[in-house]
Image (cartoon, coloured by chain):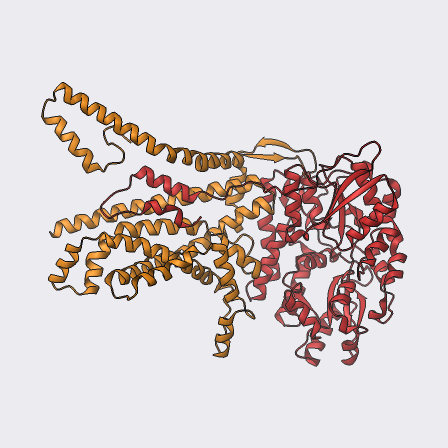
Chain colours: A orange, B red
Amino acid sequence: MSATTVPGTGPDAGAGHGTGAGIRPATVPRERARHTARRRQLGACAALMTPFFVLLVVVFLVPVGGAVWLSFFSDDQPGLGFGPERTVFAGLRSYRAVLSDPTFLAGLGTTALYCLLYLPLMVLLALVLALLLDSGAVRLRRTAQLALFLPHAVPGLIAAVIWLYLYTPGLSPVVELLGKADISIDFLGVHTVLPSIVNIAMWSNLGYNTVIFYAALQAVPRELTEAALVDGAGPVRTALRIKVPLVRASAVMVAMFTLIWSLQLFTEPMLLSQATPIVGSRYTPNMYIYDAAFTRNNYGLAAAASVVLLAVTVALSYGLSRWSNRTGGAARADEEGTR
Amino acid sequence: MSPSSHEGGIRVPGHRIRRFTRTALTALAALPLLLTAACTGGGATAAGTADGPVHITFWSALRGSQEVVDAYNRSQRRIHVDFQQIPAGNQGGYAKLSNAARAGNAPDVATLEYPQVPGFAIDGVARDITPLVGERLRKKLLPQALALTTFEGRTFSVPLDVEPMVFLYRHDLFSKHDIAVPRTWAQFEAAARKIKRAAPGSRIATFPTDGGTQLSAWAWQAGARWFDTSDGTWTVSMTDEPTRKVAAYWQRLIDRELVFLNSVDTQEGSAQVGRGEVFGKLAGAWDAGGTMSSQPGQKGRWRVAPMPRWDLEHPRVGTHGGSTFAVTKDSRHPKEAMDFIEWQVSSPEALKARLASGISSQYPAATGLVPVARKAMDTSYFAGQDIYSLFRREAGHISGQWKWGPRMTATLRIVQDRLARVGEGQGTVLDALRAGQRATMPDLESLGLNVREGSR
């Protein structure tokens, strides 16, 4: 962060300051006044940012540092391992082990598949619901909003328990009803269990993301939609050509948070693994980490897997934001070109 | 982590969040599970005073442990055992023990099943008790049982019971259809075919998709060495020649639908037996008592036969189940702890107290106790068959080459996860074993053990 762009203000605000200083020679008192103003601004900025940095260090950098440290060391015993332990520097051994472990790679694969299913579905459905709410097509808007948001207030574990009940043959009224209609479906089968998990996640998070989109839609200037209306655009056209491009930034954010959340998939499959062996003990990377630490007592391996997962998450998030910036820029250039 | 922690990140279109903040938010959200060892309140050892008894703590999930502890506390005044019932190993008991050991307050005496002994020994939870296991106790124990808890000449736990695998069968159904009880695996397959033909809704037995330990025992019987330690290295060969033979055998029975293919340690498995759809069960000797408790209505219909053999000339069996007692590293009174263990595994009073708590057909590793167990057992369920004499013969046939591996819970879990998929028509028994080996290697390597793959 450079000294000229004052944190807390946008780049446009900073540019205004700069042009003023460059053209006219400033008088001394004015210079001083500006100095004190800037100092005050910096002070406020520091005060406002400190809690963030403290939290960042305490709850993120320190644990990550700890995990990285842990991943490079091991309590080794020579030979078969029955001798006394000594802590040694193990280098990249745990990383090699993680990356050569077919169960970890399979977990990454499962998560990738999950993301491919879940991410587009979530963004699209949340956007459509938000547009419906915003268009006024839905009566009882507040009730609808509350009903959508309510599942998000249910903790993930409870949600998983509820859905597990609905999925389990012999317990579930849904399976029973479908059975009466001669439809036999095993929600916990080899091919159905992943969509079943996606369904739980959709139920939990759809309302939340709808609210994000809805909030963004509220900020769309009314003049624009009115102008579109005057130009003869129907509600669908207005939604697609005016509103959707304007909430693009929110879509990227929803996608990013959904992606990060998906990569850390844990609660739902963990609970389902108690009910069906199709969901194994290392079904997702996070479950692998848990299993490595608490079933295999292999903290070095668990730490290395955590660091790998963190790296993957950061890389994907960075990639997503870069991609959205570039395509966003291209879209803007496009618009300017046609104008 | 749920997305709700990012409420502050809602953006108004047109504004740009600074990259740094965004990265930080990303990073925060990406924060993986904090790997903190959960501390459980453990039984710290209370030091014995000069005039009072020495207190030692004992954790077990075994039924009847409270009765045994009470009998021990009554029998002498020098040592007082404080007992705590804990969940079964795979239901959290082992995690509890590991966490307690990590926190430095493991109980003096812990209960370990055979497959978990090497793991807890390597983790330093089970103490090397070689000098404490006296010659007198050693002589009382079945050598094959003690061999399973001894590595590189060091003993890490003392066996309580050892469970040779047997064939429990429905005598009434076999005679009704005039089918001979199989003595070899070839006869077993032939009988399976006859049973399927005679009673299409029934099968001779179930191949357990949750049966990692049963599959191990069959491989063990055939002479497999999944974990060989003979040259100071863990040689992992879960698909060696004998195992391939066993896997191919069961795969054939599965493919021809000569056996059921589902979990057995579940309501479904129990209901199958209750409805009389299975003609037999392949399990450790303990399951004779298990069947008595779970199927009281089938009294008089069951008998016990030896496990089918590969070679009648050279009878061999594996074991399925059984427990051992270890003194932990945190014990401040290992001698007293060992005294209690010795009494538990070798005194008739201990066995009587344990059997008084309910039906059990466990086979004591201290074979001198067999008459006590036999006397306590009412075998009318098996029409008076002398099942303990059969157990004794079978225990003598336990094959001595077997060693369990250092991370057996995880290894068997992977095998079972895959066997469950075999049940859904994906993969084979051999695939499951191969997956078990592949998933075990990285783990052992990263623990810094000497390890290599024997066969792939």
Q: Residue furthest left?
A: A24
Q: Residue B225: x percent and y percent?
A: 70, 51
Is residue B238 rendered to the left or right of residue B317? left
Question: What residue is drawn where x is 53% and y is 33%?
Answer: A91
- The percent position of residue B34, horizontal first and vertical second, equals 51, 41
Q: Nearer the viewer, residue A102 or A307?
A: A307
The residue lying toward the viewer, choosing from B130 and B355, is B355
Quadrant of residue B433 in the image?
Answer: bottom right
Residue B154: tell me if it is visible. Answer: no
Q: In the image, what residue occupies the spot 33% across and 47% down?
A: A320
Left/right of residue B261 with respect to residue B56 in the rendered view: left
Task: Using the image, determine if residue B239 lies above or below residue B341.
Answer: below
- Residue A177 in view (yes/no): yes
Whether residue B35 sits left or right of residue A23 in the image: it is right
> Residue B215, how many percent across, how many down?
68, 59
- Percent x, y of residue B308: 77, 65
Q: Is B116 placed left or right of A248 in the picture? A: right
Q: How many marks?
A: 0
Corner quadrant of residue A122: bottom left
